[in-house]
Amino acid sequence: MSVQITDAQKWLILVAIIATGYLLYLLAPILTPFLISAFLAYIGDPAVDRLQTIKFSRTLAVVFVFCLMLIIGLCFMLAVFPLIEEQIRLLLTRIPVMIDWVQSEFIPWITQRFGLQPDAIDLGGLKQSLMGHWQTVGNVVGKFLAKVSASGQLIILWVSYTLLVPVVTFYLLRDWDILVDKIRELIPRRYETVTVKLVKDSDAVLAEFFRGQLLLMFAQAIFYSIGLWVVGLEFSLLIGMTAGLVSFVPYLGVIVGIVVAGIAAFMQFHDVVHIVYILVVFGMGQMLEGMVLTPLLVGDRIGLHPVAVIFAVMAGAQLFGFFGMLIALPVAAVIVVLLRHFHEQYLNSNFYTP
């Protein structure tokens, strides 16, 4: 059914979109914890619905899923964050050693091969700067805690995130289906069919990324970290997590992982054997992704194009900061669905057809 929108309604919609964007810009600092809670509730709602299908009550299912999410979050914060911070500090202490090796081994080799002047590449200034500041830069947690202690605003922000997010997540998770039904009831009846279709298409795009791709990224990060740890690489967790996080772009995670891990392995072991081990780890990771993880976690659902994901995150960060990064992908998903809808209408319009 085709829905005709008058010019006055188009201007009203445009004004509403602009006003909403400006209001979000003004309220971005306080909306972030609520948006995080909405994201967690959106992720957890399908699990709650599945538990309800096996005779769990809504409240009991919400309590179970909420506790599971809380345990996973706490374990990640208490176990993984300190390890990552320690590896970052270790990396910063090793950078001067790496620079020494580059100056004594790599630069003479490359100058001899390509006929460059021996003093064409000078890393001495960089080394001195790092030697003077690595301790200050490395203690990320200490600096953060010091700032929090000195700023009442940051204390309030920290308390709001640690207390408000779990509370709001629980209530949103409990009332998610009710909220969706209430919002649907507010849609004008003549626009309901088209609006519901667009919302379902947007949900399919978001579900592919949030509920599928994020799990895929997390699984790859764990696999790469364990594999590099087995190889004996010092920065296995840091490199594995990085490769997993950037794997939302096809092949970018494995390329970044191989390059960074290969350089780190050569710096640490000074042989080719461990680089072969690195290639084996990422090759097995790609096989696991293609044959098991992607069919299981993502399937055949249509998601955002990788370029659209990168642009959306960068644009959101530029316009609204951290809050913009959080809303970037949902907004991008809606825009993609709307563009597909308008493209379909255009192909069926009298303007396009002869």
Image: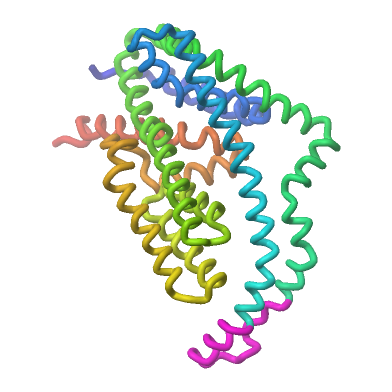
Q: Is residue 182 above or below residue 48?
A: above
Residue range in magenta is 104-124
Say whether residue 42 is left or right of residue 284. right
The image's colour scheme reads rainbow
Quadrant assignment for the C terminus: top left
Q: Residue at x 62, y 90 (%)?
A: 118
Say whether residue 248 is left or right of residue 201. right
Say whether residue 63 is left or right of residue 213. right
Q: Is residue 227 or residue 252 the one in the foreground?
A: 227
Q: In this view, does 174 lie above or below 336?
A: above
Q: Which residue is drawn at 40% across and 41% down?
A: 216
Specify whether residue 205 is painted magenta. Answer: no
Quadrant assignment for the N terminus: top left
Horizontal and vertical percent position of residue 17: 51, 26
Horizontal and vertical percent position of residue 171: 55, 13
Image-quadrant location for residue 35: top right
